[in-house]
Image (spheres, rainbow, N blue to C red):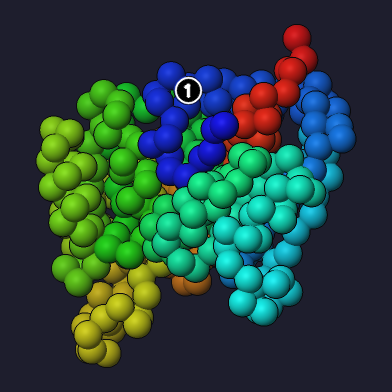
Amino acid sequence: MKHLLSPLDLSVDELDELLNLASDIAADPAKYSECCHGKKLATLFYEPSTRTRLSFETAMLNLGGSVIGFSSADSSSASKGESVSDTIRVISCFADICAMRHPKEGAPLVASMHSSIPVINAGDGGHQHPTQTLADLMTIKELKGGFDNLTIGLCGDLKFGRTVHSLIESLVRYNNVKFVLISPKELQVPSYIRNDVLKASGNEFEEVERLEDAIPKLDILYMTRVQKERFFNEEEYMRMKGYYILDKAKMELAKDDMIVLHPLPRVNEISVEVDDDPRACYFKQVKYGMYMRMALILKLLEVKLPC
């Protein structure tokens, strides 16, 4: 049985196949509207989520299936002390596939070891968020035509941002992808990403502090939130926070065809004045994420696809 716990669970060929399926779904959603008739998705969300949970639920409903589950640990038997392994054994009796979000790293892996249905990791602590990475990749492919020969800037919290780590790990598998890592020193990428992923792959990368210095060279700008609680003192936070607010003035420094992505939710790191810029693609990213989740559900359930 196939699970999706990390973006690297998919080979490049499997990822390309999934991306092609998602593109076909986006072009003609009605063709796939009954593919999961009679199938049930269980959404096991032990912590709050808006986009990811609703995206999974909408994906399954669009495929003609149905959805069961819970949206917080308090509304599940976890509040009574039930283990993840017991919960997944029970859910396996009711559903055909499940998506799990959990605050503890490795919880979806534990679930997969005791499950008789496919398990999708919908985010486990600060570890992985593979379906967000799939959404990111589809957005890049649809808007940039592919992944080779791109320069991508990753801006903000690069130390704790699980979406950033997963995206780097996925993109280093393609040709001539260059990374510009834009963050304060306190929030630079962890050493294992720098050494075991970037340096080990041979991909070109540089680390800078100022967004203005990086933005003119970028094909893609991936924004994340700088979190005040990560700084050692208020003075350092106040010194750096203005560097990472994307506004019209900074967008004027960018290429005409650069695209801006963000895993959402945003706070103030992208000014609302940027929303009307055609290069702002973070809401398109949400829709592409739904199509990717539809494709993933179809693949993991191994249902017969329409011709």
Residue 302 can be seen, yes or no? yes
144 with respect to 58 (left or right): left
Please say whether residue 58 is visible from this viewpoint. no
Picture quarter with the C terminus: top right
Please determine whether, in this image, residue 161 is positioned above or below residue 97: below
Q: Is residue 298 left or right of residue 3?
A: right
Amino acid type, label 1: Glu
Vertically, is 19 above or below 224?
above
Number of labelled discs?
Answer: 1
Location of mark 1 (residue): 14
Dot 1, how many residues are within 10 Å of its Cα: few (below 14), some (14-19), or many (20+)?
few
Q: Position of residue 11 (x, y in %)?
A: 40, 26
Please, which residue is most extreme toward the top here? 307
110 or 245, which lies in front?
110
Please name whichever residue, 292 or 270, is drawn nearer the observer in this view of the structure.
292
| Location of residue 287 (image quadrant) | top right
Query: With respect to residue 165, does 174 lie above or below?
Result: above
Q: Nearer the viewer, residue 81 or 19?
A: 81
Spot occupied by residue 69 in the image (x, y as percentages of width and height): 75, 59
Residue drawn at x 79%, y 49% is 94
What's the residue at 44%, 30% (across, down)?
10
Residue 76 pos. (x, y %): 71, 71
Quarter of the figure that contains the N terminus: top right
For label 1, the SS is helix
The x, y position of residue 134, in whole percent, is 50, 39
5 horizontally vs 221: left or right: right
Q: Residue at x 26, y 81 (%)?
A: 231
